[in-house]
Amino acid sequence: MRQARAWAIAALVALAGCSGGVGGGGVFLLDHPAPKVHTKTLKDVDGDLSKITSYRYPDERMYQYSFAEVVGKGKPVVLEFATPGHCTQCDKQLQLLKILLNEYEDRVIFLHMDQYYNPEAYTAFQVRGEPWTFVIDGEGIVRAVFPGRTLYQELQPAIERALALSQKVAKRP
């Protein structure tokens, strides 16, 4: 009887790991609406980038908008959670995002969240570790989640998919 109970508990624990979570302790589900959380912008910190990011080479374009004001407004959003001042992989991830930002600047909004300056966003998105990248379509639905460092070859197709889904929505009568 005890052995059967132990096996049942082990099976439940194993199945719990398959509940749609994305790793690192988070339970955020794909294809669900992103939480509309306010995040700090350059305007909120009087243009002082040191009050919004620990990144050595920040791109002001990633800090122009609060996530809450752009999510679900027609343009896809790439939301990066990274604290590059304390994470070498985060620094490299932000370098990649700057390349993609230059490529998609007019069609996709790119936002960077630093743990020390936007902890509410980390909580809302259940981020457990860094870097984490979320790709959200124009309707505000999370279409891709990348826990850990991501390659261009992984992120670019996810952005293209979010763009395609956003264009379909825009064409609806």
Image (spheres, rainbow, N blue to C red):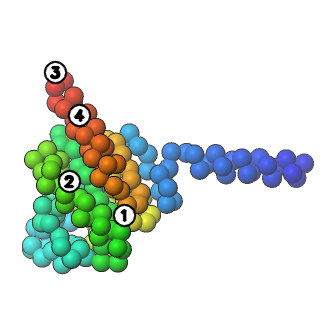
Mark 4 or mark 2, which has the lower sequence index?
2
- Label 4, residues with CA under 10 Å away: few <14, some 14-19, many ≥20: some
User: Farthest right residue?
Assistant: 1
Compute the Cα span from label 4 to label 2.
Answer: 17 Å
The mark closer to the camera, 4 or 2, is 2
- Label 2, residues with CA under 10 Å away: few <14, some 14-19, many ≥20: some
Name the side, left or right, on which 70 lies relative to 149.
left
- Label 1, residues with CA under 10 Å away: few <14, some 14-19, many ≥20: many
Pointer 2 and pointer 3: residues touching (CB < 8 Å)?
Answer: no
Q: How many marks?
A: 4
At which x and y percent is residue 136?
Answer: 29, 45
At which x and y percent is residue 54?
Answer: 25, 76
Compute the Cα span from label 2 to label 3.
Answer: 31 Å
Identify the residue position indicated by label 1 in the image.
Answer: 131
Disc 3 is placed on an element classified as loop
* Quadrant housing residue 76: top left
- Amino acid residing under circle 4: Ala
Residue at image location 55% in from the left, 45% down from the top: 19
- Amino acid residing under circle 3: Pro
Vertical placement of residue 6 versus 120, above or below: above
Identify the residue position indicated by label 4 in the image.
Answer: 164
Identify the residue position indicated by label 3 in the image.
Answer: 173
Name the side, left or right, on which 145 lies relative to 39.
right
The mark closer to the camera, 1 or 3, is 1
Disc 2 is placed on an element classified as helix
**Disc assigned to residue 100:** 2
Compute the Cα span from label 1 to label 2.
Answer: 16 Å
Mark 4 or mark 1, which has the lower sequence index?
1
